Image (spheres, rainbow, N blue to C red):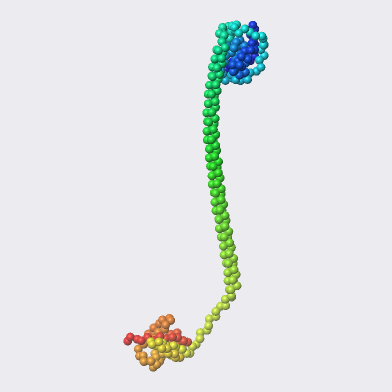
Amino acid sequence: SSGINAEWPLRSGFEVDMGLKDDMLSMGFNENRAERSLRAVQYSSLERAIAWLEAHENDPDIDDPLPPSQGHVLGSASQDSEVPVLTSGNCEAEPVKTLTEEEKAQKAEELKAKIAEKKKIADAKDREDAILREKIRRKEGQSLAQMREQRQQDEVRKLAEERRRQKMEDERAKKAILQKIKEDRAKQEEERNSDKRDSDVKPVTPVQPKPPQNYNECKLQIRLPTGKPIISTFKAEDTLGDVAAFIRDSSDLDEFSLMTSFPRKVFQVSEYGFSLKSVGLCPSAVLMISKSSH
């Protein structure tokens, strides 16, 4: 820190030469630094002001604005008089070598070179900082772009899932409606059929058993082995033996058997004495003739 107190009072016995500031301005120093350095050395000499600037050129507040000075402005002072340099605490008198015009110019150039170098370094640092900030900005921009893209993908995926879920729900609802329609139609059809059955049902009249009929005749269709039929009417009391005798008289068959086709039954010779009525051939029947092997 430059340690300058802008309110320092001028020491008694010293005169302020306002031409010193003009000299420093003519040497290329800006007004702020010229005023700051001269205040620091109590306007004692140009040489001390330049020496102070060399010692404090890297102070962070070297270029901060100065408040207006409230010191006393006196007449001109002799440049050859020896003036003590102010230090923090005690003020000790120290002789200062008077600089020639060439030395003043050299000091000024050296200070300007240091200032320029410092500015160059600061500019380079600013450029590096700018590049770094740009890299950070681009990286942040890329991150933001990636975040936006990811968010958009998430939104598209969520929208697709929502559409798929809605489609499944619509399909389930459609199936439920079709099933309900099918069930309603089946129920209506069942009700119609039930009503139709009820309308078709007629009172059942109990069947009265027919009184047994007394058949006196039996009409027989006799089929010969050749397939030729013989139709004849017999009395109900005639026997199977009478039918066998009729067949012998009506054909050239001597040995044969009598049988019915349905239900199939072959009559034995022992049954030839039974009446046609007793063997169930009345009132009509079909008798099949088959040649006997003996």
Q: Residue at x 54, y 19 (%)?
A: 113
Observer-nearest of 24 and 136: 24
Residue 16 lies in quadrant: top right
In-image side of 190 versus 252 (left or right): right
**In which quadrant is the C terminus drawn?**
bottom left
Decide: is 19 above or below 125: above
User: In this view of the protein, can residue 52 be seen by the observer?
Assistant: no
User: In this view of the protein, can residue 121 be seen by the observer?
Assistant: yes
Task: Point out residue 63 in the picture as x, y percentages from the top left corner.
Answer: 60, 20
Residue 198 lies in quadrant: bottom right
Task: Point out residue 79 in the picture as x, y percentages from the top left corner.
Answer: 60, 8
Observer-nearest of 207 and 5: 5
Task: Point out residue 159 in the picture as x, y percentages from the top left corner.
Answer: 56, 48
Q: Residue at x 57, y 65 (%)?
A: 186
Q: Count the numbered circles shown.
A: 0
Q: Residue furthest bottom?
A: 249
Decide: is 145 above or below 230: above
Observer-nearest of 105 and 78: 105
